[in-house]
């Protein structure tokens, strides 16, 4: 009972933040703000999948944007060739991205650490090459247009405020799904693999199967993120899913923190909005991202949210010790 209450407490702050974010359209924000917020939300969905892979299993993927691309291109092809709408594309794209993730994850049985990072990075580049040379089927270098709008019960959700609320809803579903995985027996098994693979294997855990499983789960999140991205941008091209977008996602999850539920949310919002707040151009933004990443690695290795939580815990402990020290001095007198 105590454990379940404690796990619910970890979800509550995320739900409160998302509830507040859902109220944003009431304040009539600018289209620029809503567009940035939607982009951030779409990234956050992929980040929750990446947090399962990296935060719980300890495996860092540098080709995660490629899995987002699988979801995006699946949605675009389904709409163009089969006239399939957004709601059917969501599960299909999630399954397709999961299948691709499984195919990539099989070699993880033989490699680990930086070798796996290089392998996923190479996959991202390979997918870009395949999409660019796919001819009319993939739209080649120019990409594909998304003609179908998002509708729900006959209502058009293509306006920015409506699409924003749609993305917030999917972010909420992603956060709850991530929370359920983290607090399940499967999540505890993944953490055992992260802490000590050899010990986990000695205890009878199939390490390879769980690694692939974590990659498949992260692929589902990425596929859903890709569908939302395709319907939001209305046009997709291979360059959107190359190496730098993957580095961008890894940067977000590392800055925010991969092990706490608020981490992906904080990382996605911070990295998306900080250049806008500081009025930085793309080159300056990349420099800032690099500086932030170095600072996080040196001073906050578990991410910004974990660092804030640790700092708060330390302040609470110090505040409790101070009166005690004063009482001792009084007794001495």
Image: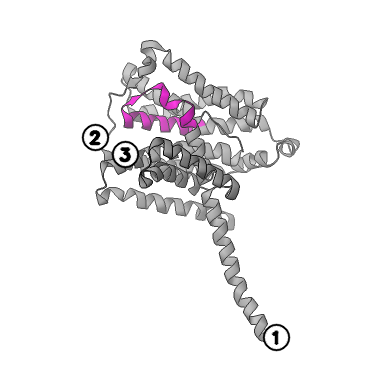
> Which residue is at the front of the view, 88 or 58?
58
Give the crowd class for mark 1: few <14, some 14-19, many >=20 residues within 10 Å.
Answer: few
> Which residue is at the front of the view, 89 or 266?
266
Q: State the residue at coordinates (51%, 53%).
A: 10
Mark number, residue 281:
none
Q: x, y (%) of residue 114?
A: 63, 31
- For this orientation, the residue located farthest to the right is 202
Q: x, y (%) of residue 203?
A: 74, 38
Q: CA distance from mark 3 to mark 2?
A: 17 Å
Mark number, residue 35:
3
- Quarter of the image for residue 146 reads top left
Region in magenta: 219-246
Q: Earlier in the sequence, mark 2 or mark 1?
A: 2
> Which residue is at the front of the view, 148 or 114?
114
Q: Earlier in the sequence, mark 3 or mark 2?
A: 3
Choose mark 2 or mark 1, whichever is in front.
Answer: 1
Q: Secondary structure at mark 1?
A: helix
Mark number, residue 156:
2
What residue is pinned by disc 1?
A: 332
> Which residue is at the front of the view, 24 or 294?
294
Q: Quadrant of the N terminus?
A: bottom right
In this rendering, position of residue 221 left or right of residue 135:
right
């Amino acid at each position: 009972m105590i454990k379940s209450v404690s796990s619910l407490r970890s979800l509550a702050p995320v739900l409160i933040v998302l509830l507040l974010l859902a109220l944003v359209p009431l304040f009539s924000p600018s289209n620029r703000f809503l567009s940035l917020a939607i982009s951030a939300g779409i990234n956050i969905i992929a980040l929750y999948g990446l947090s399962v892979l990296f935060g719980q299993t300890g495996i860092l993927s540098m080709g995660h944007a490629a899995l987002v691309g699988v979801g995006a291109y699946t949605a675009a092809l389904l709409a163009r060739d089969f006239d399939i709408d957004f709601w059917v594309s969501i599960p299909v794209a999630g399954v397709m991205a999961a299948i691709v993730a499984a195919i990539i994850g099989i070699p993880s049985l033989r490699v680990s650490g930086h070798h796996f990072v290089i392998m996923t990075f190479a996959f991202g580049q390979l997918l870009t090459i395949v999409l660019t040379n796919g001819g009319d089927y993939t739209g080649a270098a120019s990409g594909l247009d998304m003609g179908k709008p998002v509708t729900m019960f006959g209502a058009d959700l293509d306006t920015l405020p409506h699409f924003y609320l749609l993305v917030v809803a999917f972010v909420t579903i992603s956060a709850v799904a991530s929370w359920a995985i983290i607090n399940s027996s499967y999540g505890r098994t993944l953490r055992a693999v992260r802490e000590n693979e050899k010990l986990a294997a000695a205890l009878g855990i199939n390490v390879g199967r769980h690694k692939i499983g974590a990659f498949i789960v992260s692929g589902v999140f990425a596929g859903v993120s890709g569908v939302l991205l395709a319907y939001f941008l209305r046009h997709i091209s291979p360059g959107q899913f190359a190496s730098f977008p993957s580095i961008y996602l890894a940067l977000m999850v590392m800055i925010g923190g991969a092990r706490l539920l608020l981490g992906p949310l904080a990382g996605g919002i911070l990295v998306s909005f900080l250049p806008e707040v500081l009025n930085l151009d793309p080159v300056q933004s990349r420099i800032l991202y690099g500086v932030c990443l170095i600072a996080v690695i040196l001073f906050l290795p578990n991410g910004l949210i974990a660092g804030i939580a640790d700092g708060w815990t330390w302040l609470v402990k110090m505040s409790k010790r101070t009166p005690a020290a004063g009482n001792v001095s009084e007794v001495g007198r």
